[in-house]
Image: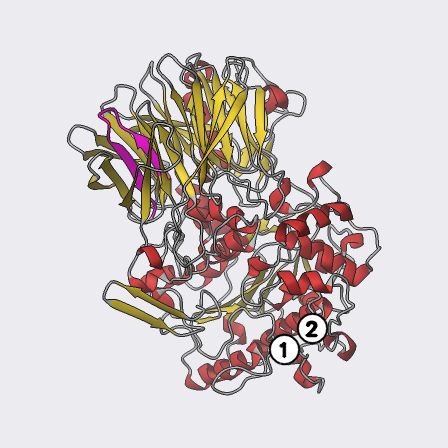
Amino acid sequence: MVAGILVLGGASLTAWALRNEFRPQTATLPTGRTILAPDPDTRSAVFTDVGSLPVNMRLSPDGKYVAVTNAGFRQQISVLDSRSGKLVSKVEFNEGRRGNKDALYWGLNFVQSPGGPTHLWVSNGVQDKLTRFTLTADGQLTDRIEREDKAPNDTTGLPYHFAGVAATAEGVYHVTNQSHHMNDFTGKLVVWTGESAEPAKRIDVGGFPLDVCALPDGRVSVSSEMDGGVYFIQPASGEKKFIATGENPTHQLVSANKKQLFVANSNSDTISVIDLASGRVVRSILIRPGAMRGLPGFTPLGIAQDAKTGMLFVAVADLSAVAVVNPAKGDVLGYLPVGWYPSAVAVSPTGQLFVANGKGVDAMHPNGKPVGALGTYGPNIIEGNVQRIDLADAMAKLKEHTQTVLQLANASDKYVKATESAFVRPPIEHVIYVVKENRTYDQVLSDLPKGNNDKSLLLFGRDVTPNQHALAERFTQFDNFYVCAEVSADGWNWSTSGMANEYVMRNSFTNYSGRGRNYDFEGQVNGTPLDREGKHSPAKNPGGYLWDAAAKQGVSYHNYGFFVTTSVRRKFGEKEMNIKDNEAAVAKLVGHTSADFRKYDMSFADSEAWVKHGLPKAPAQLASYGAKNDPSRMTTFIREYEAFVKSGKMPKLMTVRLGRDHTSGTTPGQPSPRACVADNDYAVGQLVELVSKSPYWKKTAIFVLEDDAQAGFDHVDSHRSIAFVVSAYNRRGLLESRFHNTDSMLRTLSHLVGVKPWNQYIATAPLMNVFDKSPVNSEPYEAILPSKEIVGEVNTRTAYRANDSARLISLYQEESLPDIELNDILWGAIKGANAPRPNTPRSRWKAIETDED
């Protein structure tokens, strides 16, 4: 057998085999992680589709079946045969319809009644209820019974959001994951006994509890994503003991010998081993590969143990691998290559390892045409699956598999140093990093004469975006650039941190599918800037953010619009917060954030285009903002940039948010979609012109990307997007078709200003090698003002789906207008209501709209 080939399912399947005897068939994900690619001919023998984002998996008490639950758009409980891996039965919950509250959320557990049937308990998240099924001998789920906690909720209107569930012969336990200022950021362990329709007890636990585990002595253990540890609780008395383990603990597992508890600390990349008798952590096992031990961001999640050997198998989500761990010695023995974002694992009595790949094994998801019945919306067309691996064969080749994983992940100092030595580094001292909103490559640049284009998907061509076209043609045209995220929730984390942690990954889809979570992903959680209060935010990524790394390494920085607040008044015990609107939401941005630069707000202009054309403001447009009554964001930036030039104290790093290309859809009184995108385009042009005419031009590089590409279609992949790198040192007219992504941009811009990688994704991303050592592209840039006709377009009440836009849109939060609908609105508004479109039938949109009413 050739090294690096995993023999799966007990047979030498070609699903992950070599295409020739030297080179495996691999696929690069938008995140930059490389996985082995399945062979279509044998795929069904190894992988079983189970819906969107599987997050948890359990083995039935008799070992015959594996149950899986989801937290994505399309949710179902799947039951698989533990020998063949084939789907035996499933129960669908919402058909992927946004806003359908018939949902699931992480919690999943079996209980064997003494002398009675086997029951499967699942949590239903936003519905604040549990569902119990009976598992029949042939793997069917029958006798559906629901238990709802009808306790009065607080004044936030948020659900308790049932998460982890454990069941024993004595009772059923679940936790409420939603935590906020009204409950002092705590959760609850809820105890049910017998067949009662009401809980017997509610016990306060730490913030954002996720998993609950029944311990052999009658206690239960609850993991708290906020508190960084587990709570041992005696349900009868309510007595609690807190045990610190690591950041963002998630999955727990009682050892086969019933003497230890294993806890996965997803932000800390460790497995804690707790002695149940003493309640002490006796071992902390770091699961990072040796060469990357100093870099966080690997995300251990699900844990399973082979009762025969005692070995642990840990799903390492951001390594696309399963770690094989000897818990007795605390050693990581090696890794097995698996699919995209492995989240849960199970080991059957017959020696089969089952792995839930949260995002499956397909790297590319083109959405220029409907993907079967799933449509074209990126988060909805990514199918999670369960993979079956024969352990005996896999363990016999563990050394080869480990080498494959490390090679696929570029997890070596040699790789990092080699990419840096090959990089042509210009004499850049300052970087401006611009993040925009949601466009695909084909939407904007597919009318360029060069590149991999599908012009049929064009919406905002050269007439609307003349500056972005000019910048691509003069500096660098990237036609193989991918954003790492699916939506803005994870997009703003990838764009600022280079990854999205487990809390963000799970809850971004819960939020976007309209199932009971707030937009917690840009410094505020349930409306509260936890970092400003000195509390750990479960949404904070391992290694922190770009500005954290800059502050730690003494690199000066200034912020325009990233991670700023809405008005906040919160009371924590005796202390009251009073944070004004548009302030920094995280501590490291306090004192480094422009007070006059308007936050995300679709009613405010990015550029001065409307002023330069002498146009009146649109009826619903904000005329000015800030102490100087600036008519646009760029007005503020230009004034402050010129002040930096005058003082000679230019920050090394500037972050600038220009998000109006998101658009307001066709909301009456707001600028039209074309006007919004043209305004945004001119803002980019103004920024480049400003810098190119300043004394800092030959010391500065400007980087521009979209946070995600969810609001459109692309024939290559739903993640493919526009990106721009602009400097006096760019090689002129370059078409760059090598793979790059969000992390490539973050690595490149941070490398230029001397910020070292702060997580493993940044360290292993390819540098954007588009520069010359001399200023070969140094003439000043002249911003191109889009036409008055386009800039002045205003939506009327008769615009395509104007009422839907007005009903669904929020000016201040990206997620409030479902982008699955915005895609149709933009297409109809620009190409015509009846124009053929690459999406699902109109009847499907109607079904989605009904869910929102």
* Kind of residue at disc 2: Pro
The x and y percentages for residue 577 are 32, 69
Q: Could you tell me if the residues under marks 1 and 2 are in contact, i.e. CB atoms within 8 Å?
A: yes
Q: Which residue is mark 2?
A: 671
The x and y percentages for residue 666 are 71, 66
Q: Quadrant of the C terminus?
A: bottom right
Q: What secondary structure do most residues of the magenta stretch adopt? A: strand
Secondary structure found at label 1: loop
- Characterize the local packing of mark 1: few (<14), some (14-19) or many (20 or more) Cα atoms within 10 angstroms: some
Residue at 45%, 73% in the rendered image:
582
Secondary structure found at label 2: loop
Residue at 51%, 27% in the rendered image:
144
Residue at 42%, 82% in the rendered image:
648
**In the displayed structure, does residue 295 sit left or right of residue 407?**
left
Which one is in front, 586 or 846? 846
The x and y percentages for residue 282 are 19, 32
Mark seen at residue 564 = none
* Kind of residue at disc 1: Gln
The stretch in magenta equals 211-225
Q: Which residue is mark 1?
A: 621
Which one is in front, 10 or 68? 68
Residue 835 visible in the snapshot: yes
**In the displayed structure, does residue 750 sit left or right of residue 602?**
left
Residue 287 visible in the snapshot: no
- Characterize the local packing of mark 2: few (<14), some (14-19) or many (20 or more) Cα atoms within 10 angstroms: many
Residue 239 position (above or below residue 426): above
